[in-house]
Amino acid sequence: MEGVNKYILLGCLLLGSCIWVSAQNLIPNPSFEEYEHCPVQLGNFFTDVTLWNTPTMGSTDYFNNCSTIMGTPKNFNGEQEAYFGKAYAGLYLYAPGDYREYLQVELIETLEEGKEYEISFFVSLAERSDFAIKDFGILFSSGPIVVETRRTLSKMHLYRITENSYHFLEVNYSEYYKDKKDWVKVSTSFTAKGTERYICIGNFRNNAKTRNLMTKRNAKQGAYYYIDKLSLFTPPTGNAPEALSVDIPLDEPQVFENIHFDFDASQLQDPAKRDLKGLYDFLQKNESYLLKISGHTDNLGSDKYNQDLSDSRCQAVANYLISLGLSGDRIDWKGFGGLHPIAENATEEGRQKNRRVEFVISKKLP
């Protein structure tokens, strides 16, 4: 394989001698990169985004740079690059008439009673907003919430769902969340009750009780926020891992032997996940290193389709590393379709080798 070094992660990368255990992100599709439909109109978050939904009739929005109408960075409410990847959600947390929007997802697993967890996500106030708020509400529930209202999701609504149990958190910021240029991290820690299976995010206060700040004169629009990169972890315990006995060369393309894809697919298989866990451990130990991922396909299919498929394969790898706990700030990725084969496409064996993801590790610039 000319110009490319094969690299097989050894058992020491996966097992090691340390007792430290990395945390898994319990929120699936945490940056909304996986989608059912490229967004073409307002209010289609419920149908467009994989696994996510909206618990009320409020029209939460989905933005992805695959779209010219609901794109990133430019869209009808402002201009903002995604914090990670190419997509984010948008919702009103304060609006006239107590109008509200929310988003909801089922967690990967139910939280354990008495265990400590950390939750975080990133927000940016949209340019067209003329209010900012100071509190973000986080509602855990044992079952999904479905309420036919466009107004505040109140306790009156919630406790009508008698089979549900709830755990409510509110994240208070030292200032108002009024930054329209950069992303601001919202985070808090809590002890689980053991009933938390779903999570819903939004503003659960009505207008009279919402702590808000007017950012423009003659304000009418409300407070509309972009939201990206949600994380829910158990804080790591034990000692940090010791130095790994195998180093990955810097600034050289690497190919995992086990990270290949089925035809027309971007799902990671178990051997790939084991190798990525080793890469994650290596990067967590070496915090000054950055990761660049490139995705590739065979030559079957149109150029555009293969480009989209290679993008999806990059996203699958990046999202899995983020789900393990790696910061999205350290990951860059790009799909190349079938432009760079490493084997003949005339045979299935060759095409299988071309359906791959490569990576390069480099050091941060000083």
Image (cartoon, rainbow, N blue to C red):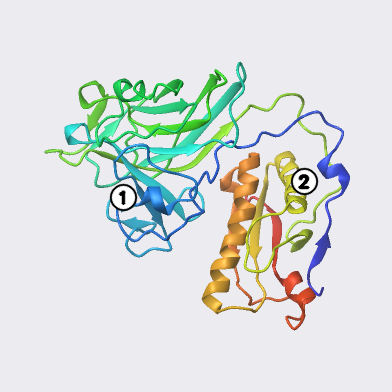
Q: Position of residue 215 (x, y in %)?
A: 22, 36
**Of 166 and 146, the residue lying toward us:** 146
Give the residue pinned by disc 1: 43
Single out the mark in the foreground, 1 or 2: 1
Residue ID at (82%, 73%): 1
Q: Position of residue 163 (x, y in %)?
A: 44, 23
Residue ID at (35%, 37%): 102
Dot 2 amino acid type: Gly
Residue ID at (54%, 73%): 305
Q: How many numbered callouts?
A: 2
Give the distance between the C-alpha atoms of the residues marked 1 and 2, in whole angstroms: 40 Å
Residue 229 tag number: none
Q: Position of residue 181 (x, y in %)?
A: 36, 46
Q: Is residue 210 at all visible to an observer of this figure?
A: yes
Q: Residue furthest front?
A: 163
SS at circle 2: helix
Residue 55 drawn above or below residue 250: above
Give the residue pinned by disc 2: 278
SS at circle 1: loop
Residue 295 drawn above or below residue 322: below
Dot 1 amino acid type: Gly
Badge 1 density bin: few <14, some 14–19, many ≥20, Cα 10 Å: some
Using the rendered view, name the quadrant where residue 195 is placed: top right
For residue 49, side relative to residue 306 (left or right): left
For residue 161, side relative to residue 190 (left or right): left
For residue 108, side relative to residue 159 (left or right): right
Q: Residue furthest bottom?
A: 346
Residue ID at (43%, 27%): 139
Badge 2 density bin: few <14, some 14–19, many ≥20, Cα 10 Å: many
Using the rendered view, name the quadrant where residue 295 is placed: bottom right
Q: Earlier in the sequence, mark 1 or mark 2?
A: 1
